Amino acid sequence: MSKAIIITGGAGFIGSHVVRLFVKKYPGYKIINVDALTYAGNLENLRDIEKSSNYFFEKANILNKEELDKIFKLYQPDAIIHLAAESHVDRSILSPMDFVYTNVIGTVNLLNAAKDAWAGNYHEKLFYHISTDEVFGSLGEKGFFTESTPYAPNSPYSASKASSDHFVRAYGETFSLPVIISNCSNNYGPNQFPEKLIPLFINNIVLGKPLPVYGDGLYTRDWLYVKDHALAIDNIFQKGEKGETYNIGGGNEWKNIDLVKMLCRLMDEKLKKKSGNSEQLISYIKDRPGHDRRYAIDASKINKELGWKPSVTFEQGLSETIDWYLENKEWLEHVTSGEYRKYYEGQYG
Ligand code: NAD
Ligand code: TYD
């Protein structure tokens, strides 16, 4: 069946994997990547598919309703998969308003654009909002986030995502907009901007720079390979029930320090360094304010109802990720120039 699908944030980390998957898997769909190309958006991520006849790119900011209206008029989309966001917790502490603008107001703009364009004709339409497990706040030693865990966001980032989730839900309830939300755990993989833990540390090991571990390093995250997240998004897009929310997770909990030590070991092997070499770079630094202690997802709903589960082990995924960064030094140089350097100096001194 032919469809037109707008994917926002398609030049970013997760968005580029979703765009690639959809462009390749659905040659009959028009895939329209709408992205403002902020510091985190990089069209180099999509070089391999940019010439595909079913791929379209529109540089637009989701804060600009007029531009969104034009794009909706031009492509007449059947569905939106919304990933565009400010996505980094540390930046949200430095500059919360950017998160309010893009994540909250931008999302409401997009909801309005879809509502206006579809004008009550919601047959076969879908507004699919991509969110995070961080909206649920922090877990203690035990337990998991389920779809019914109450929201308790602790950072400006998670508060802005929680707010956007509430607006999406409210447009479903109030205007009958066909909406789905998924909340995913921490992603890792190729093309992730090197401000997030795993790519930052890979890059710092290559450069022989300190590995800044926040606080006691005993914070826990549930890591999922980005290509498995993209597959989950496809699964939910095709089979998810409108009005529902789905948790997506790796069933793969790691304390930061254990993860960093494993990364160091793998890097020593790959860079043919003496064992223990990279670990010497570990440097405990001041904690992140409002730092959530533990995230862990109960993904049994998507598993039982839609048949999705992660396909890649952590060792496999991490090894592939390291290889990708080592083989794509040019990509890393391009994204770490300019604005990122200023951020890095401000954040880590
Ligand atoms: P990212 O920061 O790598 O990419 C965000 C993309 O959005 C970039 O291409 C950027 O140019 C674009 N963008 C930002 N502001 C925009 C605006 N105002 N208008 C149009 N485009 C804009 O983010 P990511 O890590 O790929 O995350 C994508 C989505 O997935 C986000 O909504 C995030 O909250 C969610 N998510 C991320 C993770 C994770 O671990 N990275 C986990 C769960 C959910
Ligand atoms: P991050 O990749 O920023 O993802 P999130 O905050 O969304 O979970 O961080 C993952 C974990 O790593 C988190 O507990 C914070 C920690 N961290 C560090 O210890 N040092 C760092 O330099 C960064 C970026 C993160």
Image (cartoon, rainbow, N blue to C red):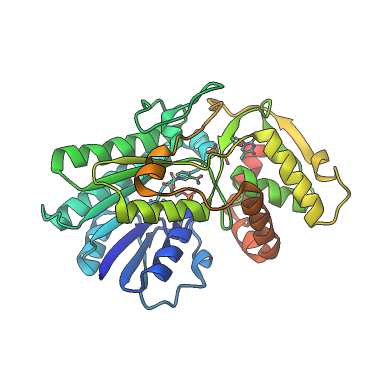
Q: Position of residue 276 (x, y in %)?
A: 85, 42
Q: Locate the N terminus and report the quarter of the image it occupies.
A: bottom left
Q: How many marks?
A: 0
Q: Nearer the viewer, residue 105 or 163?
A: 163
Q: Position of residue 147 (x, y in %)?
A: 36, 33
Side of 279 where 1 appears, left or right:
left
The single residue placed furthest to the left in the displayed view is 120
Side of 263 where 122 appears, left or right:
left
Q: Is residue 340 visible?
A: yes
Q: Quadrant of ligand 2?
A: top right
Q: Nearer the viewer, residue 65 or 206?
A: 206
Q: Residue at x 65, y 35 (%)?
A: 256
Location of residue 166 (image quadrant): top left
Q: Nearer the viewer, residue 101 or 15?
A: 15
Q: Residue at x 36, y 41 (%)?
A: 246
Is the residue 29 above or below the residue 63 in the image? below
Q: Position of residue 279 (x, y in %)?
A: 80, 40
Q: Residue at x 41, y 47 (%)?
A: 85
Q: Locate the C terminus and report the quarter of the image it occupies.
A: top right
The single residue placed furthest to the right in the displayed view is 274
Q: Position of residue 277 (x, y in %)?
A: 85, 45
Location of residue 191 (image quadrant): bottom right
Side of 195 where 99 appears, left or right:
left
Q: Is residue 40 visible?
A: no
